[in-house]
Image (spheres, grey):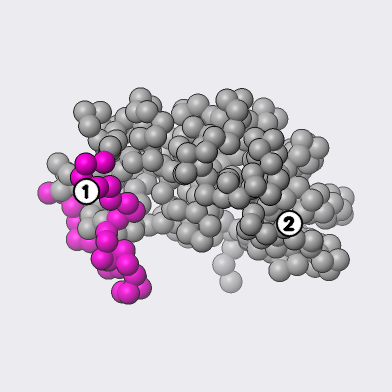
Amino acid sequence: MTKPGEGSDFYRMNGAGEMLTFSAADFEDFLEPRPDLPPSLEPELTRVVRLLVENRWPFRLHATYDESISRFIDVFEAVNREVPFDGLRWFFDHAETVTEWNLDRIKALGGGIAVQHRMAYQGEYFVARYGAEAAAHTPPITKMLSKGIAVGAGTDATRVASYNPWVSLYWMAAGKTVGGMPLYPEANCLDRVEALRRYTTGSAWFSGEETKKGAIAPGQLADLAVLSADYFSVPDEEIKGIESLLTVVDGKIVYAAGEFSSFCPPALPVLPDWSPVSTYGGYHRQLPNADTAKGGQGHAFLGLLAGLSCAGTMWGAGCDCFVF
């Protein structure tokens, strides 16, 4: 039997989730009405959460809607009265429509929130169903941060969004969908430095590794990428086109392209072998005459892992909700 903390710096057990019980699963298809979760949610989730807390297992729970989050926190607060959380790491994934009242409850229980860029792909559908005003703070990332809640960022790849972190960073900084529709006022957008922090130091909190991961600093893991453009200075629309030209993990070059191609190790095999990735290569290839994010920007160094092999195939997608 494994336990939290077992494994290596590359692959380790962090805890339980994100689906702890089927009765607590509120799906995120904004083309459909919000699901009403069954009455069995509370007793089933209580048994699971109590077991996890008693055994000091960190946990995460999928939670899209505030209505669901209210019921989940009711369970957490009841368990906490019997078996104190006492600093145990736990968090919600997604939390698009969480309210300020529930943010305060999350903070009081020491929880965090992992946000993903599902609204970048479903923003138009959300607006059509719930309106632009509701979408303007979905999710309320700046409010979460102002309350001191731990917030990590990711992609929720590959079922409801792309694994490409640059699309997610574009969404947080520019506040737009991939189709270009503005979602958020400036007050709910993050500046580029803060958006990057959510992907690096922010996400390291969720595995209890904030002193080991998230920054290029003495004593921390020295994984880094050389980028095709300067993330901090390119126009917003060009953030989505940034790629890694050189990726170093555990002191080894695992990916190289462009002027660094000579350092490229053999490509990992594409699995499954019928995947179209082996045919078209990479996340996205623009037409030769299309605007790109590579012209004359130099190279930027960031502590992020690349997502493609040297042959353009996917490499190390990692967790399906956020990147550490």
Residue at which label 2 appears:
34
265 with respect to 208 (left or right): left
Magenta part mainly helix, strand or loop?
Answer: loop
* Residue 36 position within the rendered picture, expressed as x and y whole percent measured from the top left: 79, 61
Q: Earlier in the sequence, mark 2 or mark 1?
A: 2
Disc 2 to disc 1: CB gap under 8 Å: no
As rendered, which of 226 and 205 lies closer to the eye? 226
**Dot label at residue 232:** none
Residue 225 on the magenta segment:
no
The residue positioned 34% from the left and 28% from the top of the image is: 234
Q: Amino acid at mark 2?
A: Arg
The residue positioned 35% from the left and 73% from the top of the image is: 272
Residue 48 position by quadrant = bottom right
The residue positioned 28% from the left and 38% from the top of the image is: 292
Residue at which label 1 appears:
256
Q: Amino acid at mark 1?
A: Ala
* Residue 67 position within the rendered picture, expressed as x and y whole percent measured from the top left: 79, 51
**Mark 2 nearby-residue class (10 Å; few <14, some 14–19, many ≥20):** some
Q: Would you say residue 48 is visible in this rendering?
A: no
Q: Which SS class for mark 2?
A: loop
Q: Nearer the viewer, mark 2 or mark 1?
A: 2
